[in-house]
Image (tube, rainbow, N blue to C red):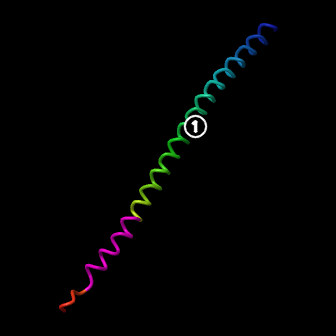
């Protein structure tokens, strides 16, 4: 009887150790993904700003091209 309880306790402790290891690995992965998402968001913001700057600079050139020359 005592051997059964001891074996069951060892099994539970072994499972707990594996679960703790898996939880730590999962936590490390989540932290890495969070950092990657932050970097991607920042890159997206920079690209958005560049597109806005090019669009605003391009609007002036586009309206200038659509105007009639003075001799018309």
Image side of residue 55 versus residue 23, left or right:
left
Q: Residue furthest left?
A: 71
Q: Residue furthest front?
A: 70
Q: In which quadrant will I find the N terminus?
A: top right
Image side of residue 17 versus residue 58, left or right:
right
Q: What residue lies at 58% left-to-right and 29% top-to-bottom?
A: 25
- Taking the magenta stretch, the answer to whether it contains residue 54 is yes
| Residue pointed to by mark 1 | 31
Q: Secondary structure at mark 1?
A: helix
Q: Above or below — where is 6 with respect to 46?
A: above
Q: Nearer the viewer, residue 62 or 19?
A: 62
Q: Which residues are magenta?
A: 53-67
- Occupied quadrant, residue 34: top right
Counting labels gives 1
Q: Position of residue 11 (x, y in %)?
A: 70, 16
Q: What residue lies at 45% left-to-right and 50% top-to-bottom?
A: 43
**What's the magenta bit mostly, secondary-structure-wise?**
helix
Q: What residue lies at 31% left-to-right and 79% top-to-bottom?
A: 63
Q: Residue furthest right?
A: 2
Q: In which quadrant will I find the C terminus?
A: bottom left
- Occupied quadrant, residue 49: bottom left
Q: Position of residue 55 (x, y in %)?
A: 37, 68
Q: Position of residue 15 (x, y in %)?
A: 67, 21
Q: Residue furthest bottom?
A: 72
Q: What residue lies at 28% left-to-right and 79% top-to-bottom?
A: 64
Q: Nearer the viewer, residue 6 or 23?
A: 23
């Amino acid at each position: 009887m005592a051997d059964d309880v001891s074996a069951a306790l060892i099994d539970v402790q072994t499972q707990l150790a594996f679960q703790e290891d898996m939880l730590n690995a999962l936590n490390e992965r989540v932290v890495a993904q969070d950092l990657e998402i932050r970097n991607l968001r920042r890159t997206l913001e920079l690209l958005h700003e560049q597109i806005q700057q090019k669009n605003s600079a391009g609007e002036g050139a586009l309206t200038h091209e659509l105007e009639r020359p003075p001799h018309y």
